[in-house]
Amino acid sequence: MKEKLILSILLMVTAAVHAAQGTHETKKPNVIFILTDDQGSGDLGITGHPYLRTPNIDRLAKEGTRFTQFYTNATVCAPSRVAFMTGQFPVQHNVHHIYMNHKFNVKRGIPDYLDRDAFTVGDLMKQAGYDTAHIGKWHLEGRDLKSPPSHYGFDEWLVTHDASASPSYIKRFNSTEHNVTMASHWIVDDVIEYLEKQKKSDKPFYLNLWTLVPHGLLNPSKEELAEYKNLNANSEDFKSWMKEYGEDAENFTEQMKVYCAAMTSTDKAIGRLLDYLDESGLSENTIVFYTSDNGPEDYKVGDATNAGVGSSGISRGRKRSMYEGGVNVPAIVRWPNKVKANHVSDAIWSGADWLPTLAKISGGKLPRTYKSDGEDVSDILFGKSKEHKKPLFWEWKYEVMGNKKYNPPQLAIRQGDWKFLCKPNGSAAELYNIKKDPAENNNLASKETSIANNMKTILLEWKKTIPTSAY
């Protein structure tokens, strides 16, 4: 707590300096981070979905750069969010699973919420002279213990649910059974209200806008479903693993109607935000980063039986799997005249890179004792070709739903074109050339033994650095 107190004092001093300097500085960009929940890499019109209409998110991609090899650092939502927030792999915070109630957390060896002493994006941006806000899903705390965004560097916040749920959202959620899809519109309403207030501030802003869609249980309204009333879904319209997945669905057409209706409704909400940014003149100097926390949910999970047909494109696996379908997700960055428009990049980066990249862009300073698992990828955002220097690592110790072929060994590493997986004892080795085999169909571990052994050594050494749970 002592370091956090010192940091708070430094934040106030730095903010005062920034205020005093005023117009003598180059104007820093505003930042809006839009995070959806369980959206697959194939779940956009612009990525080739045969039915889904997302004209506003597609527009965002056309006005910015879409990244085809962006990764989350976990296969489920809470640990993935830890990485975005801290710039560190979630295992470094003993977060291996979602935060639930205290009994669930103890059983899985995880804390009840993200360590309040952790250095976060909120802390960084405040130190850099930004107003900070979080609006939407939080899920960095348990269901029975509060630890809201105010503990992590956010000046203003509204949380949709869990222990820190804001009264306005409790009231709204109780007002309709269609609250998951409606929440996208409520969140955007509150974001626009926040941005209106920001007109009075002379400081830039950093804003998390985190939706609930398309996480189950989805229950879109009749009006939302009407958009897809004539849809007749056919698994033959998909390829690879998604085609196989659709063939086994209980009612592919009706599930797809619900899923598409929810995503299109959220797309409309995001469209209202983009229109507001244009009309208010904020678009020009605002970075918009759009991505998802992990791959699509499996319909064998109870709250997704009605709509668990999100698309992982051609990729193997879904949520909870360390194969590409569980961790490779949509990613778009727009910053007019800075980030290339209508551009597609295959550069590799991940959620852990978000914080160090913002440090570079915002001029924020990292604490002397802070160490990121990510790296500054601002040059990648600005269109330069660059290899990701640090390997990406994952660990998942729990059940993977659905198809047994989605269930990988416990550990994984991505380095360059290659991805290697194995058990903690080094057995069950799998090696894939993701550039040539993005669907992970061809295990080359027995053929490319030099590459496999080298990556195994690095992966098992990383495993040794994972803290032993104290919970």
Image: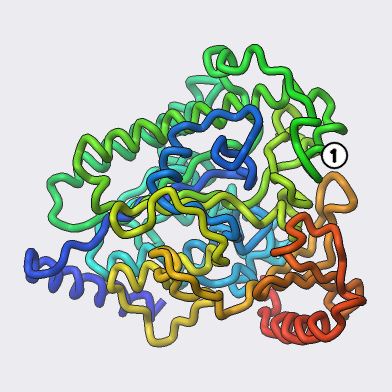
Is residue 417 in sight in this rendering? Answer: yes
**Viewed as shown, does residue 96 lie left or right of 423?**
left
Q: Where is residue 203 in the image (x, y as percent from the top left)?
A: 18, 58
Amino acid under disc 1: Glu
Q: Can residue 355 be seen in this view?
A: no
Give the quadrant of the N terminus.
bottom left
Residue lying at 55% horizontally and 28% vertically, measured from the top left? 53
Task: Please name the residue shown 38% across and 64% down the image.
Answer: 382
| Placement of 441 over or under 366, stated as above or below | above
Q: Is residue 120 left or right of residue 446?
A: left
* Closest to the observer, 193 or 109: 193
Point out residue 265 in the picture as x, y percentages from the top left corner.
Answer: 50, 27
Q: In this view, does 373 lie above or below 320?
A: below
Image coords of residue 295 (percent x, y): 66, 49
Q: Residue at x 47, y 38 (%)?
A: 58
Locate residue 358, reporting x and y percent: 37, 67
| Residue placed under numbered mark 1 in the picture | 244
298 relative to 405 in the view: left or right? left
Quarter of the rendering containing residue 219: top right
Q: Quadrant of residue 220?
A: top right
**Quadrant where the C terminus is found in the figure:** bottom right
Secondary element at image label 1: helix
